[in-house]
Amino acid sequence: MIHRISVLLSLCLTLFPFWTGSGVPTSPQGTDMIKKEAFGTSPDGKPVDLYTLKNKHGMEVRAMTYGGAIVSIRVPDRKGHFDDVALGFDKADDYTAKVPYFGAIIGRYGNRIANGKFTLDGKEYTLPKNDGPNSLHGGNKGFDKIVWEAEPFEKPDEVGVIFKHTSPDGDEGYPGNLKMTVTYMLTDKNELIFEYHATADKATPVNLTNHTYFNLAGDGQRDILGHELMLNADSFTPVDKTLIPTGKIVSVKGTPFDFTKLTVIGARIDQKDEQLILGHGYDHNFVLNRKDKGLTLAARVYEPTTGRVMEVSTTEPGVQFYSGNFLDGTLTGKQGHVYKLRYGFCLETQHYPDSPNEPSFPSTTLRAGQTYHSTTVYKFSTR
């Protein structure tokens, strides 16, 4: 009898080598679908790991624990040729030395907060001013500059990594201990899914997003002005000279901000429009057309020379379209590609910028006992 049990256990370990006593299959250090490897160290000496995720169609996503940053996304063109459509660097050191937010998790507050201040429940909080007079993307040391804990997983139709971090009370001026998980999932439908969860023990503003720069023609080989963009937004939030929303919500109709139909990004970007001049191009929040709080199509991008298509769906009320206006040729990315003006674009799903100071905008306040939950899906295909 003992011999029979031993044989059965041996057979189980052979068939299911990554089975744990909890009854849940766990991911190994490396399989055909997930691979983990060392990727350098952070500025404070912590090791940085790189995870490579693959699906059954050959799509590949690489993400590292420093900033939870997406390092690369390889997808096919209409002829089946794979290329990297995300801007980034070959080494972790380059991410720590530069601050373009390539691929990173952004928080506590994605986008800008005016004058580095907000008032919550009658108390004023002061934040670092790291973008002129304003606080941007969480301050001097936002979530893009910390090493996240990571746990890979594998399911029949998807693979992924769960990133975890607790931001302490007072971190960059924000109140409350904020406990977060950000899950990256690569599905066999060629979807890259970002799912955010957070809880706090004090009321605090939370606005998490991802800051991947895309170029569907391939990593940094030319500008993105020939891409065609559709935004499911009839209105946007205009900004002042420091790129803080004025508080108004304005129709895009008859303006260079009308992307309600597929439109070439470069078609109107250099027009003498006040908002384009203030943003040095597009760097604005678009108010999504939504019927409910579920996943809603936010954007569709088509790159004509390769046939690549990217669709963005989200539970968020807005999306920041940024046309790479501050890329200036001083950054050399993967494979020696120099990232020049408008060589990448971002579609950052979000609540509106400066919401803590703008009562008319959807609230970003997470209170103790509540759970923050946000989902964004980037789906890739060709035509």
Image: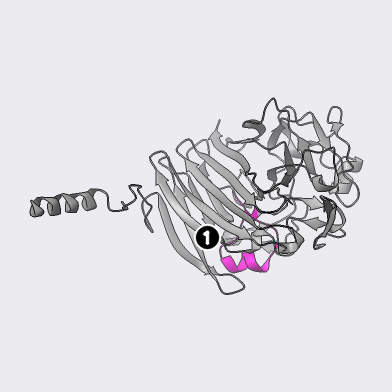
Write the residue at 59% across / 53% down.
180
How far across and how far down the image is residue 310, in percent?
Answer: 60, 37
Compared with 85, 337 (above or below) is: below
Q: Nearer the viewer, residue 68 or 198?
A: 198
Compared with 204, 155 (above or below) is: above
Residue 103 forms part of the magenta stretch? yes
Residue 81 forms part of the magenta stretch? no
How far across and how far down the image is residue 10, in percent?
Answer: 17, 54
* Three-letter amino acid code at the position of disc 1: Glu
Q: Main secondary structure of the magenta part?
A: loop
How far across and how far down the image is residue 224, in percent?
Answer: 69, 44
Q: Which residues are magenta?
A: 86-105
Residue 81 in sight in this render: no
Q: Nearer the viewer, residue 110 or 79?
A: 110
Quadrant in the picture for the C terminus? top right
Task: Write down the residue under mark 1.
Answer: 149
